[in-house]
Amino acid sequence: MTTLKQQLQEDLTAAIRSRDELASSTIRLTLSAVTAEEKAGKTERTLSDDEVLKVIAREAKKRREAAEAFDVAGRTDSAAQERAEGELLARYLPKQLGDEELTAIVAEAVAASGATGPQGMGAVMKLVKPKVDGLAEGGRVAAAVKAALQP
């Protein structure tokens, strides 16, 4: 069974052979981020697939934020490039939860925690976070919890 890092390396080789500039540069940067994470800290280590997924998610988030910044600046060509890179990285990530699914998980957590207002947000987040980790961006989760706790 191949690990996610090995899959990235194989996809990089295939992208280079097919002369796909977008895929090769994006995957190369992602592998560089994985290697940097492996070397971070006092001792070098090999990342697990879950840790590699977190690195890929972080890189995809960077691409989304850069695309938004380029849109605001009126640089649509650069924004399109960042979006394309983000979509390429999204192929390696698990399918994101839809709004309905996220709302249902949050409602279940609100009922389980007994929270009634904004002061219960921490308790609800503590219950929701393990269920949606890697399946929904933190900002979306926080917004859904906040909306569910509004009086």
Image (cartoon, grey):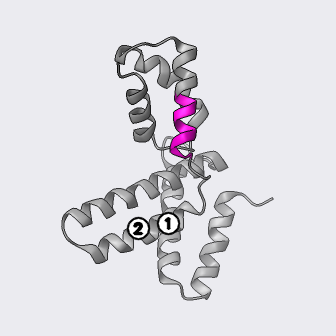
Relative to 144, is 26 above or below? Answer: below
| Residue occupying image coordinates x 60% and y 88% | 18
| Magenta span dominant secondary structure | helix
Residue 136, position as x, y percentages in the image: 51, 43
Can the viewer see residue 101? yes
Q: Amino acid at mark 2?
A: Arg
Of 14 and 78, the residue lying toward us: 78
Q: Residues within 10 Å of mark 2 (few under 14, many from 20)?
A: some
Give the residue displayed 43% in from the left and 28% down from the top.
145
**Labels 2 & 1 near each other (Cβ < 8 A):** yes
- Gap between marks 2 and 1 measured at Cα: 6 Å
The secondary structure type at the circle numbered 1 is: helix
The residue labelled by disc 2 is 83
> Could you tell me which residue is drawn at 43 percent across and 19 percent down?
122
Residue 11 forms part of the magenta stretch:
no
Residue sitting farthest toward the right: 1
Q: Which structural element holds mark 2?
A: helix
Q: Quadrant of residue 130?
A: top right
- How far across and how far down the image is residue 71, in percent? 25, 66
| Whole-percent x, y for residue 30 in the image | 50, 63
Q: Is residue 98 left or right of residue 122?
A: right
Q: Which residue is mark 1?
A: 87
Three-letter amino acid code of the residue under disc 1: Glu
Are there few (<14), some (14-19), or many (20+) residues within 10 Å of tag 1? some
> Which stretch is magenta?
97-106
- Quadrant in which the N terminus is drawn: bottom right
